Structure formats: C-alpha cells, structure tokens
Amino acid sequence: MWRKMLDQLIRRTIGAVLTLGVVIAATFFATRLSGNAADYLLPPGMDAQSKQAMIVQMGLDQPVLVQFWHYLQGLVTGDMGISLYERRPVADIYAERLPNTVMLFIYALVIAIVVGLPLGLVAALNRGKAIGSAIMGIAFIGYATPNFVLAIIMILVFSFNLHWLPSSGSMTPLHFLMPAIVLAAPMLAEIVRFTRNAMLDVLGQDYLRTARAKGLPEHVVVGKHALRNASIPIVTILGLQVAGMVARVVIVESVFATKGIGDLVVYAAIGRDYPVLQFGVVLIALIVVISSLVVDYAYALLDPRVKVAAS
Amino acid sequence: MIKTLLSALAMTTVLVSAASAQSLTVGVQNLPPWLDPGKDFGNQGSQIYFSTFDPLILKDYSQPGANFISGLATAWEQTSPTEMVLTLRDGVKFHNGDTMTADDVVFSFERILNDMTPEFAGIHRQFFDNFASVEKVDDTTVKVTTKKPEPLFEILLNTSEASIVPRNYIAGLSGDTNAVEQSDFDAFMMAPVGTGPYAISSFQPGETLVWSRFGDYWGDVAPMETVTLRRIPELATRVTALANGEVDLITNVPPDQLQTISSNPALKVEGAVTPLFHVIFFNTENPKLANPKMRQALAYAIDRNLLNEALWGSQAKVPGAHTFEQFGDLYMGADAQTYRYDPELAKQLLAEAGYDGSPIRFDTDPVYYTNGLLAAQAIQEMWAAVGVNTNINVTTKWTGPDEDMEVRNWSNPMYFADPAGSFGVMWSPKGSGSEMTWPTDQAYADLWDKFRYSTDVAVRKEAYGEIMDYVAEQMPVLALYQPYESYGMRQGVNWKPLPGHIPYVLDFRAGSISID
C-alpha cells in the first residue's frame, strides 16, 4: 500500500514539476511579447545613447533565447535575478513582501473556516427554516459580489464614514482585517454552501440513524459521525479556494495598498519588470500546485476508502 | 458584543493614526524604486531629493524667479565665462557624521562627468554636457571649468542632480572600502546619505520612506521630527486614508476629486500650476505628417483654452510658447504666439497640404497623464471640426520611438529653470524628443548653440524667440497646458507647493511647513 502511495506521490510530483516548467516558459515569453521593458522603466526624457547603455546593462539587448537560457541557469542556481526597476535582488524584494501576503492568507482562511463551518452546520440543521434560508441568502450574496466592490463598500462604510478601521497599508494586524474579510468572503460562502450540502447528504444516511438509535447524544452524532464524513468535500473546496484566493489577492492588495506579492506583481506587470513578474507568477503557480497536492493527501488522511483504493 | 468589539477596534485605530505637531504622514501615489540624486531626473525621485540633499547653491523657492542663496557653498564668483570658483561652507555634516570636504564635492561631480554608470552618463549629457571639470583648489575652495562659455552656472549648480554626496561613505559600502566601485553605487541607492535637513532613516522601495530630523544640520533645523511617506497608489484609497485620519497629506489629487476633499470640513486642498507641460508631439518622419503644414493645421485646430476650461476648471495654464514663468528674464510672457487657436487657418493649411481624409492615429496611455485620455477625445472632436479623422489608440506602451507613431501625448517637465532645462532636454538638436521624431539641420544646431552658450541674456532671449518661431513653422511639439497639481491635507497642516521648485518636490524644510 505504501509503495503505491509513493508511486502516486512521485507521479504527482513529476506532474507538478512539468506544470511549473510550462508556467516558467510561458511567463518568460509572454512578458517579452508584452513590450520592451526599456520603454516603461526609463524616464521618457532619457537620451537614446543612455537608453541603449541601460538596455545593455539590463541584458535586454541579447536575443530572447539567450536571455531565457540565462534565466534558467539562474533558476537552477537559486538566483532569481535583479529587479530591473528596483535594481536589487528579486529574492530580497519577495522576502520583504511575502510575510504580508502569508499573514493575509492565514487570516482569510481562519475567518472562512471559523465562520463558514458553523454557519453551514446551522444552515443544514435548520433546513427549511427562516434562519437556514437567511444564512444561505447571505452566503449567496457573499459569493456573487465582486471583491473590489465589497472592498470599496467596506472602505466607504468602516473607514470613510465610521472611521473604525484603517483603509490602507499593512502596518498593524488591524490593517489586515478588511482585506482578509474581502479575501475570505467567496471562500466563506463556498464553505457554508458545501458544509450545508455535505451535512444534509450525511444526515440522511443510515449510520446516523444507527448512531442515534444507539442513544448517542445529538452533539456527538453531528460533531463526530456527521461532520467527519462531510469534511471530504469541504477540504476539496478549501483546496480550490486557495487557488481562487491567489487570484483575488492581486486585486485585494491593490485596493487596500497591502504591501504583499499581489500588489508587487501588479506593478511589475505594469512596469514590465520581467524578473519580478516572472518570479511572482512562478511563485503563485507553486502555491497552487502545492495546495492541490496537499488536498490530494488530505483526502487519504480523512477518507480510509482512498487508502484502500490505493492498495 | 459586536458593538463593543468594533468600538475597541475604533480606539486602536485612533491610537495608530494619532499625529502630533512634530510628525507628518504623507500618502504618495508613487515612491521611487531607488535614490541617488546624481542619477535621477524622474518625477518620483524629485519628490525626495530636495529635503534630503543640498546642492552648493540654493535659492529662494517661495517665488518663481532665480534668487540664489548660499547652500553648501558660502560664496561663488564667476572668474571667466568658462570658470567659477566656489568657497565651501565649513563644518557641514553628512547624515552619517562625516564632515563634508572639497573631495566630496569633486567626487559628486566626477561620478557624473566620468560616466561611472549609464544613468550618470545620462545626467552628464542632459545637465552637465558643458562641464569640463570640477577641481579642488584647496580644502575649502573648488573650481568648476566648462568647455564653452556657461550662462547657467548657478542654475546648474542649484539642481538636485548637483547635490553633494559623501565619497568615503559610498566607497565603504561594499568590496574594497577605500575604492569606489559599481557595487558601491548600487548599495548607495538603498541607503542614501546627504547633508540635508532630513536623514532617510528607513526606505522600503514602493512602500515607505521615513525622514528623521537631522540634528546636525548646518542651516535651520527641520520643523518635523519625522515625516513618513507611504505609497498608496489607488486614488480612492488615498483620499479615504486622508478622510480617515491615517495620513495628513496626500499627493496627486485630480481635479474631479477636489470637491470630495474640500467639502469635508476637516480637510482642505492646496495646489499650484506646476512647471511642466502636457504636450502632444508629431512624428515628422511619418509620411502622413511629413508636411509641416499638416502639423501646423493640427496644432491650430486645438482650442487649448476650452480644454483647460472643461478638464481643469480653468485652473491649468495655457502657454503661448514653450516657456515657463520660472525662466525669469527669458520668460516669453502670456502673449507669445508660437501656439494659438485658429481653426480657419487650420482648414486652409489642410487643403494646402492635400490632406486626403485618412485617419490620424493618436496614441495615449489610459491613465498615466491626468486627463490625458479625456484630452485626446476632446482633441479628436476638435480635429473632426476641421475635417480630420482621428483614431485614438489607447496603449500602455511608450510608442514615442516607434516608426509608425503619428501623434501622441507626453509631458515636458522643467528640470531646471531655463529653456535648456525643459524645451532643450526634449527638443534641442540632441534632445530626446528630437532624436525620436524630429531630426534637425545644422542651422538649427547653430541657433541652439547661440542660445545655449551666449552669456548675454538679451542675445539668449532673442535666440530663444527665433527657436520658437522655428517651432511654430516646423511644429514638432505643441504645449497644451501646465497642469494644476493638487494636494489634499487635513486642516492644521500649513503646506503648499512652492513656485520656485521643479515639479513634485515635497519641500518640508524650515519655513515651508508647519502644523497647528
């Protein structure tokens, strides 16, 4: 059984590496196709001679394939290159930015799970009642509202009018509250929906009737027997939502001026800062690939049948 | 319970954003990616350099004219048309504690004049092309020598590009601590040190810059204990941060947001016409626009006063020529006729040029220039009124050097207060605009040299008039207006942009700002 799982792990890892390889190549050439960095990075008043010298210094005078070769060499040796805009190592820039995005992700995940799971449970246990419908209605609105709209509404209400929360920056934990809520909203809504549906599925099963018949108290029936079995689709949704969160963080960080990698990637794209943009896209791809791997293995832990199937 | 939680949060916020009379937080649209006054003439860096560094010669910035006062030099004398001798101020300290010496002054110019990096080379060509050498005479005296007679000694030595930086500190930043290497300049960009009233105590590119009062400043000490610049790129977020008390001052407020700010009793708006032109320029090498009459027609067809009224609430300034009030004696006044509106003449010129109705492509960035796209759309209508078809090509790409470029918008800032420092940087024979779209002949080069290097103001003024006549005839570039640059701030912050500066300078020196 373990051998089979190891095989699967190797196969998945190879798949993940191939995916990353495609992303790396696609990003490299797509950024080059989108325009010449020198047209964006250098002041428009710069004379042609200095401009040419800068292009040579940045290595942009070389054929694209040669640039790609140097880039790959750098990747292999762990050298992510020098930002064309900030003129310092890309790794340094990401090291400054990454903690903010990670913090935002953790906040958002915690909010989505801590709020979403109980709401989903309540909605399932109160199916057909007003409270159940109200929760589902709110979840639907949370899912359907574009994040930039929600962000602006929250800024208007809590910063502009009520002056309760800071609107921008990443100086204190409080600065992360609104962006984390906006980032969490669609995931939260998904968790509510899926928890409710999964619970409704499970609640109708025979083994729950058995558990009740055994005389187990209701909270053990729901908490242990039902929720554990309902958790598999919920974990799937979490995995998918991490990918969605990566996409949303780009917008959320821009609106709230959170100094994370989303904000960085946006401005690298606008300014054609190739090395920063490339590393950002590869990093995001890496996060998505790893999170789906983690979901696969979480299945195995949660569902004995997956293990059985593997053996 | 939620109410209690929220009010607890609210109290924390108040604590976080509390500003005192000694500290100031500024929400800026942009922060520069790196800092070195000798390498940089961009709009982002110009916000920073003046409060951090000193040049040898300062001036009274409260007025547009050139009233020079002593900076790091206490006296200066032009000993010949090509030579100036300066006496250095004693006991000036850099932010790192080093004392400024004549060697630092020589070094600050040598790195530019010796083209130590491509950026220094660029500043060399654009600002100090005429400088032959800067030499130490003795410990407190330096001599600047130029190749040709130099009418702009003081103006050039007043630029932030001519700021003095510490040689030994830079040499010690990396590698051999006694020698100046390329890597030292790279390190300096992240940890810049000057002699100005504020030292940079923290700098995270694209994020924050913190200025601390420099206690050993040679002049009047800085009025603020700390100034924090926070980059907030989104306009709505910047305005909200101001309304929410998170910042005290914000930059880059477009005209349509002024009402939002000024209608809030806790806030106010300050602004000024900035010494920068929004321009449109023509690719004279594109067959469609090769005939000067075609370009003249397009220029005559634009009602710039109407643009000003509609887009800027008449707060911008429409010029008669490529000329700024800051030029002092060389200012051509509001009556200059290089640029004017004459749609009838435009129609006539179009007929003479044999315009066949084929559409003209007008390139514009969607957001880079305030009102840039709106102006392009208005111009499209104005050209339609004289019978010209226009396709607006909205692109983030800088199409200036493209062969198929026809017309596009751009900005021409005043880098220093002389036509050579604004028109010249772009449109002199070797200017960056001329290089792209307007190859010129020897006669123009001779005329330019006569203007640039004559030491007689009257001769220079006349020559620049001739240059403008030539521009009117050739029409490579049309100055639309000087935009009105606005800042939002809370009541109690006494600050406004001063007319003696180049665009975007955040001048927080003594006398320039106070907080009630």
Image (spheres, coloured by chain):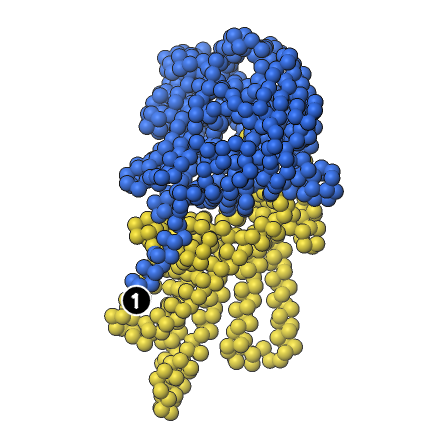
Chain colours: A yellow, B blue
Tell me if residue B423 can be seen.
no
**x 43%, y 32%: residue:** B512
- Classify residue A136 by image quadrant: bottom left
- Asked if residue B351 is positioned above or below residue B101 in the image, the reply reads above
Residue A144 percent location from the top left of the image = 36, 57
Q: Is residue A16 visible?
A: yes
Q: Which residue is located at x 63 percent, y 48 percent?
A: A89
Dot 1: within a 10 Å radius of its alpha carbon, few (fewer than 14), some, or many (20 or more) residues?
Answer: few
Give the residue pinned by disc 1: B1
Q: What number of labels is visible? A: 1
Closer to the camera, A168 or B466? A168
Mark 1 lies on a secondary structure that is: loop
Quarter the N terminus of chain A occupies: bottom right
- Vertical position of residue A190 compared to residue B411: above or below: below
Chain of residue at mark 1: B
At 41% across and 65% down in the image, what residue appears? A112
Q: Is residue B49 above or below residue B422?
A: below
